[in-house]
Amino acid sequence: MRSEVFFDIHPVFTLDEFHAARAETGVKLSTSKNLLAKHVASGRLVRVRRGLYATVPRGVSPEEATVDSYILAGHLARDAVVAYHSALQFFGKTYSVWSRFHYLTRGRRRPTVVQGAEFIPVQDPAPLRILEDRGGGIVERPHAGGHVRVTTLERAMVDVLDEPERSGGWEEVWRSLEMIEYLDLDAVVAHALALGSALTVARVGLFLEQHAEALMVDEWYFETLRGHVPRQPRYLDATHASGRLVHPWNLVVPEYVLERGWRSRADGVARPAGAWRGRGRVLAGGV
């Protein structure tokens, strides 16, 4: 493949990808390196870091060129997958827009900053790391002249509930997930169980229960999740914030999450205490 043709269809690429595309010509790796260096010098490419390049659009100077953050995140490791809040943001389902991007990878990487955006690697969860499909829920979507590997909305929903600290805390998580109009609930439950965390299962159950009507959640899904919740009461997160013990999820949930108190701040209308009613019994007190 001619270099210019390759550049036109690869806004971000690695040295290995470029060399593989030219392999049929029998060129040496050193020749590919020299050719890329020539195009960097001419302003056709920018070198993001060793072995990673971005194409500069015609008519744009290298200093003015911007690199798409989602495509870049997907090239920071061979197996990189845009995930967590970044996956929700890719699909337009976040309350806040961030310049911080998380991506999944089997290996260990260091965070990096490119053009003011922060890219944070996260190792695949231990129960999924050895699986060939990495637990599934990974798709490839066309974007900005290239392609992005990203987790599905269903997997992203469970992942942000599994690790809310990566996604801005409960208000950001709740407000973002409430923007999703439809979910494949079979996929949601399957991924929640695959992670092997009773606490995560309970969080997923709590969210689905609060939004059962909007998401059309059948009782079967609740029954399946209830079989895997913590046996003893657990706090919603590591802050051990006081709240109400919510059955059947065995979670101590802060009032502002149960009542979605941030809505009161937004519309100026006070919400009465106890306005939320779950399917299970709600008790006062903590663990």
Image (cartoon, helix red, strand yellow):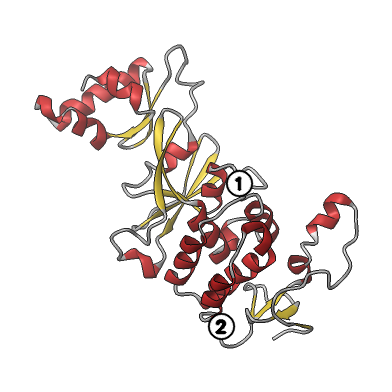
Residue 51's place in the image compared with 187, above or below, is: above
Position of the N terminus by quadrant:
top left
Residue 12's place in the image compared with 182, above or below, is: above
Would residue 97 appear left or right of 13 to someone viewing this image?
Answer: right
Residue placed farthest to the top in the image?
A: 59
The percent coordinates of residue 169 (x first, y second) are 65, 60
* Earlier sequence position, callout 1 versus callout 2: 1
Q: Secondary structure at mark 1?
A: loop
Position of the C terminus by quadrant:
bottom right
Identified at 67% across, 73% down, the residue is: 239
Give the Cα separation between the discs numbered 1 and 2.
Answer: 29 Å
The percent coordinates of residue 266 (x first, y second) are 83, 50
Whether residue 136 is visible here, answered yes or no, is yes
Whether residue 27 is visible here, answered yes or no, is no
Using the image as rendered, state which of residue 74 and residue 114 is in the foreground.
74
Would residue 248 appear left or right of 104 to someone viewing this image?
Answer: right
Q: How many marks?
A: 2
Q: Secondary structure at mark 2?
A: loop
* Residue wearing tag 2: 230
Identified at 34% across, 18% down, the residue is: 41
Identified at 9% across, 27% down, the residue is: 26
Residue placed farthest to the left in the image?
A: 26
Using the image as rendered, state which of residue 172 and residue 182 is in the foreground.
182
Going by the numbered disc 2, the residue's amino acid type is Pro
* Residue wearing tag 1: 93
Q: Quadrant of residue 141?
A: top left
The percent coordinates of residue 269 (x first, y second) are 90, 56
Would residue 127 appear left or right of 21 to someone viewing this image?
Answer: right
Going by the numbered disc 1, the residue's amino acid type is Lys
Q: Residues within 10 Å of mark 2 (few under 14, many from 20)?
A: some
- Numbered mark located on residue 163 in the image: none
The answer to whether the residues at label 1 and label 2 have Cβ atoms under 8 Å apart is no
